[in-house]
Image: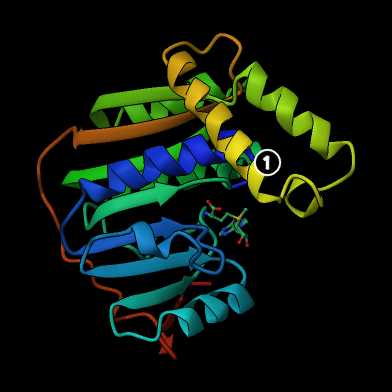
């Protein structure tokens, strides 16, 4: 990992997912299933708007436990309430415009089973309180870990001056990856306070309301080559 902030994010995400078992995981905006290996449930469903990325993901995981869902995160009406054990969204919600962000978040929370877990990453922007209130209205227990502290941002800024950090010739070298990882450990010292940080990883559990779980059933939707069409 070349970014200290992402190294922190994925370490915490991997730890949280290692604690989640059950039947169904939803990776919301899964791209080419780069995070698939972290999920421990029996079935994995990667949602994305980009059909080509879903096809790439499925080519990497040629098994009958991995599926794609071609859909817009703001339009997930076809997925039943309280039906997925784990729902995750990282590195995506901030890309959506404000109204779509709220709709997507409401759907993702709605889909989580009463005993399931919701994990999402948000920016500390002007919409944060509204977005957090959507999460808090769905889950009794909400843990927030703040990250992307000034040290990570400074390190990332040095390399970003030359463009996209991931392709920087120096940032990608092994000693610099090690340095990025070491800096990411400092995020564990600053994760309790929003002050100075730019992002938050939120974990919601203990769903509020009647525990009326439903079967995760997309059989009414068109399915081709392990991709359900919800568009
Ligand atoms: C940066 S990638 C995130 C990949 C992965 N979740 C991660 O943590 O790195 C963003 C993905 O969001 C998808 N995306 C953007 N807007 C979307 C939407 N409204 N509905 C579903 N997917 C969307 C893009 O196609 C892209 O694959």
Q: For numbered disc 1, what is the local secondary structure? A: helix
Residue under the image location 47 percent in, 10 percent down: 193
Colour scheme shown? rainbow
Residue under the image location 90 percent in, 42 percent down: 162
**Which is nearer the eye, 10 or 91?**
10
Q: Quadrant of residue 217?
A: bottom left
Residue under the image location 61 percent in, 23 percent down: 198
Horizontal placement of 71 versus 145: left or right? right
Where 53 falls versus 166 (above or below)?
A: below
**Which is nearer the eye, 219 or 86?**
86
**Whether residue 96 can be seen here:** no
Where 22 falls versus 179 (above or below)?
A: below
Q: Position of residue 28 (x, y in %)?
A: 46, 56
Q: In the rendered image, which residue does mark 1 sit on?
A: 176
Q: Residue furthest right?
A: 162
Horizontal placement of 163 versus 182: left or right? right
Q: Quadrant of residue 12?
A: top left
Q: Residues within 10 Å of mark 1 (few under 14, many from 20)?
A: some
Q: Quadrant of residue 83?
A: bottom left
Where 117 falls versus 226 (above or below)?
A: above
Horizontal placement of 90 versus 152: left or right? left
Where 224 falls versus 159 (above or below)?
A: below
**Whether residue 22 can be seen here:** yes
Q: Residue furthest front?
A: 175
**Which is nearer the eye, 83 or 56?**
56
Q: How many marks?
A: 1
Q: Residue furthest bottom?
A: 225
Work out which quarter of the rendered image holds the C terminus and state it: bottom right
Residue under the image location 48 percent in, 27 percent down: 185
Q: Position of residue 145 (x, y in %)?
A: 41, 24
Q: Position of residue 182 (x, y in %)?
A: 54, 31
Ligand 1 sits in quadrant: bottom right
């Amino acid at each position: 990992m070349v970014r200290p902030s992402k190294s922190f994010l994925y370490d915490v995400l991997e730890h949280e997912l290692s604690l989640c078992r059950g039947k169904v995981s939803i990776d919301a905006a899964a791209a080419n299933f780069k995070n698939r290996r972290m999920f421990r449930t029996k079935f994995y469903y990667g949602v994305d708007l980009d059909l080509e990325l879903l096809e790439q993901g499925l080519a990497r995981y040629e098994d009958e436990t991995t599926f794609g869902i071609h859909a817009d995160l703001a339009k997930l009406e076809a997925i039943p309430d309280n039906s997925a054990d784990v729902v995750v969204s990282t590195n995506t919600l901030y890309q959506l415009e404000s109204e779509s962000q709220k709709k997507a978040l409401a759907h993702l929370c709605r889909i989580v089973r009463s005993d399931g877990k919701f994990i999402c990453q948000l920016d500390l922007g002007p919409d944060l309180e509204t977005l957090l209130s959507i999460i808090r209205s769905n889950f009794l227990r909400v843990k927030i870990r703040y990250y992307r502290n000034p040290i990570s941002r400074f390190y990332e800024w040095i390399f970003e001056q030359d463009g996209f950090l991931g392709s920087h010739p120096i940032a990608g070298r092994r000693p610099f990856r090690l340095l990025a990882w070491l800096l990411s450990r400092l995020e564990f010292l600053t994760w309790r306070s929003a002050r100075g940080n730019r992002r938050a990883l939120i974990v919601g559990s203990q769903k509020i309301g009647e525990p009326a779980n439903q079967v995760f059933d997309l059989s009414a939707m068109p399915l081709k080559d392990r991709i359900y069409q919800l568009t």
